[in-house]
Amino acid sequence: MTRISEFARELIMKQIAFQQRRGEMGIVTIDSPPVNALGIGVRRALDTSIRQFKDDAAVKAIIVICGGRTFFAGADISEFGKEPESPLLSDVFNLIENAGKPVVAAVHGSALGGGMELALVCNYRVAVPSAKLGLPEVKLGLLPGAGGTQRLPRLVGPELALDLILSGRSIGANEALGLGIVDRIAREEALLDDAIDFVRSVLREDKPLARVRDRGDRTEPYKDRPEIFAAARAKAGKTARGFLAPENIIKAVEAAVTLPFDEGMTRERELFVELRESTQSAAQRYYFFAERQASKIPGLSADTPKLPIKRVGVIGAGTMGGGIAMNFLSAGIPVTLVEMTKEALDRGIGIIRSNYENSAKRGRLTTEQVNRYMALLTPSLDTDSLGDVDLVIEAVFERMDVKKSIFEKIDAVTKPGAVLATNTSFLDVNEIAAATRRPEFVVGLHFFSPANVMRLLEIVRGAKTSEQVMATVLGLSSTIKKVPVVSGVCYGFIANRIMNPRREQAEAVILEGTSPQDVDKALYDFGFPMGPFALMDLVGLDVVKRDEPYRTVKQDLLNAGRRGQKTKAGYYDYDDNRRASSSAVVAKIIADVAAERGIAQHAPLTQEELIGRLLYPVVNEGARILEEGIALRASDIDVACILGYAWPVFTGGPMFWADTVGLPTIVAELRKMAEQHGPGFEPANLLVQKAESGGRLTS
Ligand code: 3HC
């Protein structure tokens, strides 16, 4: 354990903790930006402050409150994986719980993870109405490891505790009050004053100290009800397939019901440590920071002035354009939606309205919100109507000549300083920019379908795109609740380019003797929601069809009228309930295509061989994307794959996963594939370099 000098300790303490007395009240204010994470500095500050007030006989009660934007947002995630330093969270919590006088948590912002656990250790909790409380550890592949799994069930019962901990969702202060998690709601601007009032009333009542750990009334009735845990397991098996944390969470909450408190805490610790040491949790913690890192461009200062985006124009009211428009409407930004014909425009607007109305039916929006969003939408049949917009996003079909003529037109009609964006998935953004007189204002904004749902937004930086435009669209992405990943210009940008080899290899291996079912199963078991063939059947083979210079299985299937689920036949046969089964017709088509193309069929690849064959080329493409400077960092590639292609987050994305597999293994396997199947598999220089030097793709 690291020792620090008394002087340094004092200094850290002074910067983070502020102690004051108000009559009999000792108030500890912790202010450690940005989110008061319970890192070593905060733990030391808490430890010293609580100790002082505990030992001061004149102090009758202690209030713990935070400065800045939030209550404690949890343990410091960056400390996991490092040598733990004393005092540990459990030491601080023991101190609070055994202070011998009431300790009250005064909560604003978010009390998350260890932060909520700290509040549960206190004797009482006071919160402002806007405060949120939650145990989101599951999203980091963890469980609440500072007593959350033992105390929350004692407060709200194991069923609700399971729901909250397994989902990781936060609840508002008023809901928490109703559930007995919070004892008093304070006025928004008077948290400390109201907390003091509350504590005075507690002291006046002079009741024995209430400790959550001593409660048994909410857990006792569940001692003989193992079915609630079985139900939680069944649900988690479906909603969190492949994740390890849910099972340990269920076991820990079971322990809260069946074991005395201290034994339950020991069990929680074992289960927590098991998860903390797992590759899954390392991957999910890496992803937490990766997502936040993605919006930062090295060299682009955080105070680069942004252009005001008060009104947006979207060209194309198809599925993509409509979805893009919804992002802005939902953020309160007016949109002018332009189409070529009235029919197409009406159809597009109808879809937007029905999407919103469906959300209202599910209780996610109010009718008033739907009307407000729709009122922000101005339909138009003329690009001339875009004179007053600050940003135009073009979402028409993928043809360079069409895009260029649109950009020429919008360059002429929009005001100077308006940003012109293309939603192209593959085309050269620099060529599109060259069609305008303002290439520095041209950028790619590549949304993923459905654009109103998918969180990924690739921001394609053209050779001339200005820093101001980059800062503007990065800021805008957070306004519309997207996670931005910056890409350079290349065919397919990051997500589509890197995942293309998986499709190519899937289509290749079925010609070599492995069935589409085996391919889909291997990827499903790896953690993808479905394999490529099941996905193509779902989307429609006619939709994903591409022209190839040789005979393909897909084209033969289309020729046979097998367009996917909609025709009850694609790579699979489907019954009336859309249940898939293998098809003799497909097997014959595959064999015929292979024979015509002279591809020898051999024994099916094993699941392990399939993962290598399908995903090592993805890693290789990622390494090329990195060495070409298309991605700013390896973690951006992981974010793009996880959010754009549902790559399982518990593996960390292809780059992090490659590091866990071992780069020398991947290089050796790619070389074998290159010998068997051609030079396209040759490992990228960067991959070879890193493998030889014992390096990693991710940091
Ligand atoms: N540890 C370390 N850093 C953290 C952190 C944490 N718990 N929570 C946030 N940060 C950092 C972010 O990385 C970011 O850093 P950056 O500015 O350098 O990119 C900065 O704080 C601000 O975070 P956000 O950009 O996410 O700010 P928002 O205002 O959008 O959100 C928040 C604030 C809701 C608190 C959000 O940051 C969040 O959800 N944090 C994580 C909460 C969490 O998972 N807590 C559980 C931790 S595990 C735990 O407690 C284990 C325990 O049971 C033992």
Image (spheres, rainbow, N blue to C red):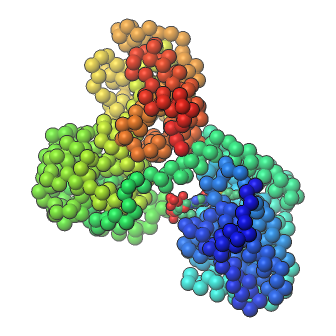
Which quarter of the rendered image does ligand 1 occupy? Answer: bottom right
Residue 419 lies, in percent from the top left, at 24, 58
**Which residue occupies 39% across, 53% down?**
297
Residue 411 lies, in percent from the top left, at 15, 55
Lateral position of residue 21 relative to residue 355, left or right:
right
Q: Is residue 274 visible?
A: yes
Give the answer, above or below, for where 434 lies relative to 363: above
**Which residue occupies 37% across, 66% down?**
303
**Which residue occupies 74% across, 69% down?**
6
Lateral position of residue 56 relative to residue 126, left or right:
right
State which quadrant residue 183 falls in: bottom right
Residue 407 lies, in percent from the top left, at 17, 50
Q: Nearer the viewer, residue 175 or 669?
A: 669
**What count of labels does the image hold?**
0
Lateral position of residue 418 relative to residue 229, left or right:
left
Give the answer, above or below, for where 580 lies relative to 117: above
Location of the C terminus (image quadrant): top right
Location of the N terminus (image quadrant): bottom right
Q: Is residue 88 visible?
A: no
Give the answer, above or below, for where 502 lies relative to 398: above
**Which residue occupies 56% across, 21% down?**
609
